[in-house]
């Protein structure tokens, strides 16, 4: 089959070159966008008097037919098509003849592949946002459920201070909120229309790029034709957003893995979200959490791939840019699936409060709170810190907890302290008291949940 661009050539492309050069294997994913873009383009060409109404009607009918043919599986693209743009155009010409040859007026595949990708990505962003909203709503519900449930807060993987489980959930809520805000911002720069930029420098024909932008639901046409065909920043932004968000999911997945370990057993992941071992009959592995952690790596790879492709490419279009799609598609698929599966894993996980409680007495979790009680009694914090340090040392030699120390033992550490000075140092009282803005007290976590819910409700608008 002769290529649509074959005029100046005296030989067919080598078969290996055909294979190597083609993007149809992956860009056929955007066939709908490609056809919708062409329908808007020819509508504009007709309105501007560049093609006749009759030709436009024939082209639109032909394109609709091709769309239906691809959907039904009747049309199959092959490497002979090279890319989706030529796959659709050559079929249009086969279908309607002469009129079909007018479609590719005042555009180029350089702008066409970009209008397709931007439309594709815009729709995927909307779907990803929906999934992120859902994940956030699951987090809020769980945070509410566990707003009063106390667990160990870690720093350096060491027992640090008691916190509520709801508080941990709300930390992840904030991360995902930033992911959402970042993605919405990326959408603004994605939703600009490069169609009509042509090869690199615009056209002498009297086109109306504002019209095509509007017909396709873009906010505006892109400003500069040269930039329009060589810009992949919106994809890079998306890949960065995906990388950061996958990093968040990966961090939480890591917590799931160790919360689920024999040593911790802080959580119980439903059987439907775990797998067994083919040799060890007793195993219940957190494979889904591990896989989520691992998937982050491939999205980072996607980002690095495109950053590297773009580096050092001169203006305007270069064939290197065709390498912008597979990594983008991979990141879309991976991120989208990961968010959904994470939400369901959360819904299918409960905390084992009996196991957590057994750990709460270890590691002197109330030490900082005790120092703060001393501050309230007028002792400077630096001194209080040292006194509690000595109390801990005493407990370690005695093999007891801070709350077990007697008045005599306390005054032997420092004459200013007694059980009365320390007040209520139970774990519950410590958590209850951490009411500072953003703190872990249940009342404060409930405030965070309310702010979060209001924000989430406002996002759908
Ligand atoms: N298939 C290409 C892509 O996906 C678009 C074609 C532009 N190629 C060209 N030789 N001008 O980026």
Image (cartoon, helix red, strand yellow):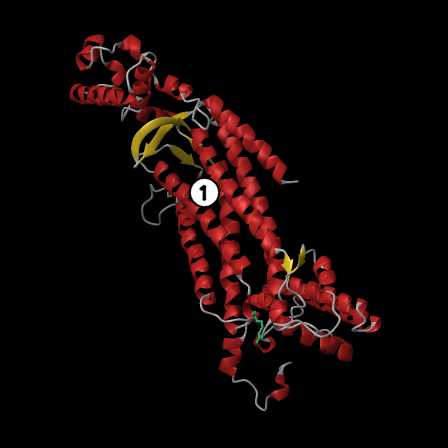
Instruction: Name the residue nearer the viewer: 415 or 266.
Output: 415
Find the residue positioned furthest to the bottom.
10
Q: Secondary structure at mark 1?
A: helix
Residue occupying image coordinates x 31% and y 23%: 368
Q: Report whether 270 appears left or right of 51.
A: left
Residue on which disc 1 sits:
273
Q: Report whether 280 appears left or right of 69.
A: left
Q: On the image, which quarter does residue 212 sit in?
A: bottom right
Residue 198 point in image, percent of width and height: 65, 71
Q: Is residue 255 above or below residue 361?
A: below
Residue 26 point in image, percent of width and height: 55, 66
Q: Is residue 95 above or below residue 28?
A: below
Quadrant of the frame with the N terminus: bottom right
Q: Is residue 190 above or below residue 141?
A: below
Find the residue positioned furthest to the right.
54
Judge whether residue 275 can be spotted in this image: no
Ligand 1 is found in the corner quadrant, namely bottom right
Q: On the image, which quarter does residue 102 sit in?
A: bottom right
Quadrant of the frame with the C terminus: top right
Judge whether residue 157 can be spotted in this image: yes
Residue occupying image coordinates x 78% and y 73%: 50
Q: Is residue 389 above or below residue 294?
A: above
Residue 209 point in image, percent of width and height: 71, 64
């Amino acid at each position: 089959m002769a290529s649509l661009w074959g005029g100046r050539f005296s030989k067919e492309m080598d078969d290996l070159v055909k294979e190597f050069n083609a993007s149809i294997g992956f860009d056929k994913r955007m066939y709908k966008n490609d056809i919708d873009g062409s329908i808007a383009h020819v509508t504009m060409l007709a309105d501007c008097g560049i093609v006749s109404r009759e030709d436009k009607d024939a082209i639109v009918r032909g394109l609709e037919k091709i769309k239906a043919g691809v959907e039904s599986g009747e049309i199959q693209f092959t490497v002979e098509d090279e890319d989706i743009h030529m796959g659709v155009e050559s079929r249009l010409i086969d279908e309607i003849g002469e009129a079909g040859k007018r479609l590719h007026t005042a555009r180029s595949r350089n702008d066409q592949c970009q209008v397709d990708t931007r439309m594709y990505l815009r729709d995927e962003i909307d779907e990803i946002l929906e999934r992120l909203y859902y994940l956030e709503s699951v987090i809020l519900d769980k945070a509410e459920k566990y707003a009063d449930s106390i667990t160990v807060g870690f720093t350096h993987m060491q027992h640090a201070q008691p916190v509520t489980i709801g508080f941990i959930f709300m930390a992840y809520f904030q991360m995902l909120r930033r992911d959402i805000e970042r993605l919405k911002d990326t959408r603004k720069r994605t939703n600009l229309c490069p169609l009509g930029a042509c090869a690199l420098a615009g056209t002498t024909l009297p086109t109306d790029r504002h019209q095509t932008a509007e017909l396709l639901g873009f906010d505006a046409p892109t400003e500069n034709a040269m930039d329009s065909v060589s810009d992949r920043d919106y994809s890079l932004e998306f890949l960065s957003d995906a990388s950061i968000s996958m990093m968040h999911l990966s961090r939480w997945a890591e917590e799931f893995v160790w919360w689920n370990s024999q040593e911790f057993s802080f959580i119980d992941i439903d059987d439907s979200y775990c797998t067994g071992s083919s040799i060890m009959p007793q195993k219940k592995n957190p494979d889904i959490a591990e896989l989520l952690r691992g998937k982050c790596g491939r999205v980072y790879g996607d980002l690095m791939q495109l950053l590297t492709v773009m580096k050092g490419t001169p203006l305007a279009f270069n064939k290197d840019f065709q390498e912008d799609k597979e990594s983008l598609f991979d990141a879309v698929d991976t991120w989208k699936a990961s968010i959904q599966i994470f939400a369901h894993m959360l819904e299918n996980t409960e905390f084992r409060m009996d196991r957590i409680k057994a750990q709460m007495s270890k590691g002197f979790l109330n030490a900082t709170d005790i120092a703060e009680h001393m501050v309230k009694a007028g002792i400077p914090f630096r001194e209080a810190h040292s006194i509690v340090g000595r109390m801990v040392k005493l407990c370690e030699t005695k093999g007891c907890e801070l709350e077990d120390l007697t008045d005599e033992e306390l005054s032997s550490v420092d004459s200013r302290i007694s059980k009365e000075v320390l007040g209520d140092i139970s774990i519950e009282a410590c958590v209850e008291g951490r009411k500072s803005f953003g703190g872990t007290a249940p009342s404060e976590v409930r405030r965070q949940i309310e702010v979060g819910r209001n924000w989430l409700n406002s996002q759908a608008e």
